[in-house]
Amino acid sequence: MGKPAAEAHASQKGAGNQPKTARGEATRKAILTAAERVIGEKGYNDASIGHITSEAGVAQGTFYIYFTTKEQVFSELVLEMGRLVRHTIAEATQDIGNRLEAEEAGLRAFLEFVQAHPDLYRIVQEALFVDPAAYEEYYRTFADGYRSGLVAAEAAGQISKGDTETRAWALMGIARALGEQLVVFKSEKPISDLVASAYDLIANGIKP
Amino acid sequence: MGKPAAEAHASQKGAGNQPKTARGEATRKAILTAAERVIGEKGYNDASIGHITSEAGVAQGTFYIYFTTKEQVFSELVLEMGRLVRHTIAEATQDIGNRLEAEEAGLRAFLEFVQAHPDLYRIVQEALFVDPAAYEEYYRTFADGYRSGLVAAEAAGQISKGDTETRAWALMGIARALGEQLVVFKSEKPISDLVASAYDLIANGIKP
DNA sequence: CTGAAACATGAATCAGTATTCATGTTTGAG
DNA sequence: CTCAAACATGAATACTGATTCATGTTTCAG
């Protein structure tokens, strides 16, 4: 029984060892940031621990002080993206009483976030292949929130009646597609134009 | 100059060595099919050449008679998916004069295809990380076709005016999201329901 | 029939890289 | 100050898996 069984019941989520000093804190954050950039750019498999630690300016072994596994940093990044995106959208829409307007504001906030964090965006997409559970949780959580918003709006008569679940997925699909336009296809189109067009489609459809 | 410089100017697309006998033809197809299943299920990185060849019932070295690289089979599968999907949708919509109806029929055809070929669907998604060029070509080609259809419909007064490019991306985003529902999230919802809800959204929007 | 081209085999090669570890260095509570 | 806990190092380990190759076997045009 030599081991203190420190990490017996994970102090935080599935996080590796948590730092206990300011120095450790900084180092962990440096690694996490480097991982975001490197994995986002090269993809999970081509991003080696060596790349990450050298980008972070620490030795290779240091990685394993704070993370148990390469996959674990990845998962943590997916979680982080989830928290950040939900927070960003919630904040952007909290004062808006009308759902259609909220839809527009939320989409804009999402696209701005994605443009500012392209690496995180890609990481979430890659999660489908690296950490399917994290991927599913990300989208399920998101969709649940989305759906309940739609249900409320429907009840309040702010939107027409319809299959809220499918609508939620479809609307998320639109947001994703436009986000991909920015991050993957490097579209030059201004976000406001994307939002305006998408909003018109969402509100009115394309029937003449 | 011992080498016949056989593959000097690729006989077919970027395809590896093409078989020259019936036996070879069959073997190549067996490997391709196995690759589709194995890569679709395990993902690119966990799918080893050994897995693929054993699933195909051939020796490991046989793989390299028909493909130059692991990445190359993958690319070929992405191309195949592109051809098949375009063909499927074109066929399902060719006799439909009205764009809105075509939209509905096309979406249905796409979802049915995706449900029948979940492995190919996943492979295309993973292409963003394994072979970005193939991924981009897949979606660019698709979007171009989509967009020109919308332009024609707009001119014919079958749909309202709007930013065709963004609309094309958004509509593809809806299709993708629903496809993912089927393949990734294993939704039980019947395709007709998905199509009906999505069609209503696309045609009329959600404004009350 | 027949032999050169095709095809098939599977063991060996070879490189990359995640993870571990023995050894220092730094920090901060007391 | 002081020393035990934290933190950091980077070389060594260990393993996986793509690709090659020397050696047979099969096909089919002539």
Image: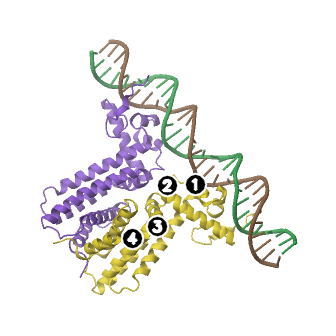
Chain colours: A yellow, B purple, C brown, D green
Other-residue count near label 3 (Cα within 10 Å), few / some / many at <14 / 14–19 / ≥20 = some
- Circles 1 and 2 in contact, beta carbons < 8 Å: yes
Residue under pointer 1: A51
Residue under pointer 2: A42
Residue under pointer 3: A117
Query: Which comes before the other along the chain, label 1 or label 2?
Result: 2
Label 2 SS: helix
Query: Which comes before the other along the chain, label 3 or label 4?
Result: 4
Q: Check disc 4 and give the amino acid type.
A: Leu
Residue A111: which disc?
A: 4
Other-residue count near label 2 (Cα within 10 Å), few / some / many at <14 / 14–19 / ≥20 = some
Q: Check disc 2 and give the amino acid type.
A: Lys
Label 3 SS: loop
- Compared with A141, B109 (above or below) is above
Q: Check disc 1 and give the amino acid type.
A: His
Residue at x-position 19% and y-position 56%:
B92
State the separation of the CA atoms marked 1 and 4: 29 Å
